[in-house]
Image: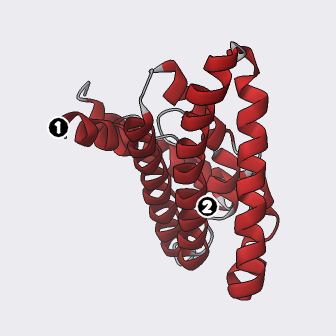
Amino acid sequence: MKELLLIAIGSALVNNVVLSQFLGLCPFLGVSKKTETAAGMGAAVVFVITIASACTSLIYDFVLVKLGIEYLQTIVFILVIAALVQFVEMFLKKNMVSLYEALGVYLPLITTNCAVLGVALTNVQEKYNFVESVVNGIGVSVGFTIAIVLLSGIREKIEYNDVPHSFQGSPIVLITAGLMSIAFFGFSGLI
């Protein structure tokens, strides 16, 4: 139990997928303009990464390893992730139209979000069992959600500040993300 808690906290804060590993930056920067949209993207990522971690762990252990074709892991993982994202997209399009429209092009981009694939590959690399893989997936996705919601809150506040013209738009967002990265670096205990 203690090891699972360490995996979850380590994945969410110490090795934050966005702010420490710099994976998943496209939706992180693109969907973080409004907190509601950022939270919706975070929820979609939590679902996709958690289910992808479970599915890819089972597929790796019971299909790829048994058949001796571990070298196909990246292709198989991408196919599993693409199928899960299609499921999420269909669900949101039918049940949450406003969130579906707000996420726009960034929802299908979860398929190519390197954070999702990175978690599946990390689970294999670290030799996590099924439960550890799912906990790692939950930790990573919660860390992504924390980062994107924090950035969206800061971006909403920045709108009302007097930002110099040369820093308006993307430059101030990148500076803010860099400062958040430095802050999260403190969780590693190296500062």
Residue 43, compared with residue 143, is above or below; it is below
Residue 68: image location, x then y, percent: 68, 12
In the image, taking residue 13 as reference, residue 29 lies left or right, namely: right
- Drawn side of residue 88 relative to residue 50, left or right: right
Residue under numbered circle 1: 2
| Foreground of the two, 13 or 131 | 131
Q: What residue is rendered at 61% in x and 66% in y?
A: 41
| The label number, if any, that marks residue 164 in the structure image | 2
- Numbered disc 1: secondary structure: helix
Nearer-the-camera pick, 7 or 148: 7
- The kind of secondary structure element at disc 2 is loop
User: Looking at numbered disc 1 in the image, what kind of residue is underneath it?
Assistant: Lys
Residue 22 appears in the figure: no
**Quarter of the rendering occupied by the C terminus:** top left
| Residue 125 disc label | none
Position of residue 146 measured from the top left corner of the image (x, y, whole percent): 43, 58
Residue lying at 63% horizontally and 70% vertically, measured from the top left: 33
Which label's residue is closer to the chain start, 1 or 2? 1
Say which quarter of the image contains residue 80.
Answer: top right
